[in-house]
Image: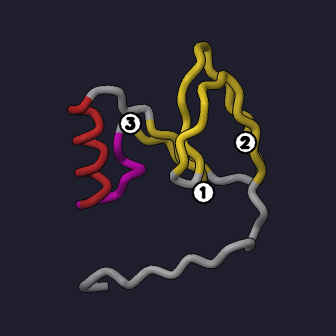
Amino acid sequence: MFGVITADSGLDWLRTVSRSLVGDPSRSPFIRMTTGRSFDIRTSEPLLYELDGSERSTTTHIKTKVKPQAITVCVPEREGS
């Protein structure tokens, strides 16, 4: 799963974080999620981006691949599940 967050203002970020905490983050108008093995993202202007929690320099082009089954993530079940 790959996600891009387009929130810009403080209010947009507040809406995005609150939606993520109480519901389905993919329903936020500021989050675009998709699945795939490789991604080629181009922007019309240089933007800062974050990868695995680390901020990177500005760019207009990000190309990345995902190695299937390279990591297992375990999370607790939601209450009531």
Amino acid type, residue under disc 1 in the picture: Met
Q: Is residue 57 above or below residue 15?
A: above
How busy is the neighbourhood of tag 3: few (under 14 within 10 Å), some, or many (20 plus)?
some
Say which of 44 and 28 sits in front: 44
Q: Position of residue 27 (x, y in %)?
A: 36, 47
The kind of secondary structure element at disc 1 is loop
The kind of secondary structure element at disc 2 is strand
Sequence-wise, the earlier of marks 1 and 2 is 1
Amino acid type, residue under disc 3 in the picture: Phe
Q: Residue at x 71, y 52 (%)?
A: 36
Say which of 21 and 27 sits in front: 21
The answer to which image quadrant residue 59 occupies is top right
The reply to whether dot 1 and dot 2 touch (C-beta < 8 Å) is no
Q: Residue at x 45, y 39 (%)?
A: 5
Q: CA distance from mark 1 to mark 2?
A: 11 Å
Outermost residue, top side:
44
The residue wearing badge 2 is 39
Q: Is residue 45 above or below residue 10?
A: above
Left or right: where does residue 22 sit relative to residue 31?
left
How busy is the neighbourhood of tag 1: few (under 14 within 10 Å), some, or many (20 plus)?
few
Q: Is residue 12 above or below residue 22?
A: above
Sequence-wise, the earlier of marks 2 and 3 is 3
* Numbered range of the magenta stretch: 22-28
The reply to whether dot 1 and dot 3 touch (C-beta < 8 Å) is no
The answer to which image quadrant residue 68 occupies is bottom right
The kind of secondary structure element at disc 3 is loop
Q: Which quarter shows the C terminus?
A: bottom left
Q: CA distance from mark 2 to mark 3?
A: 19 Å
Q: Which quarter shows the N terminus?
A: bottom right
Residue 30 marker: 3
Amino acid type, residue under disc 2 in the picture: Phe
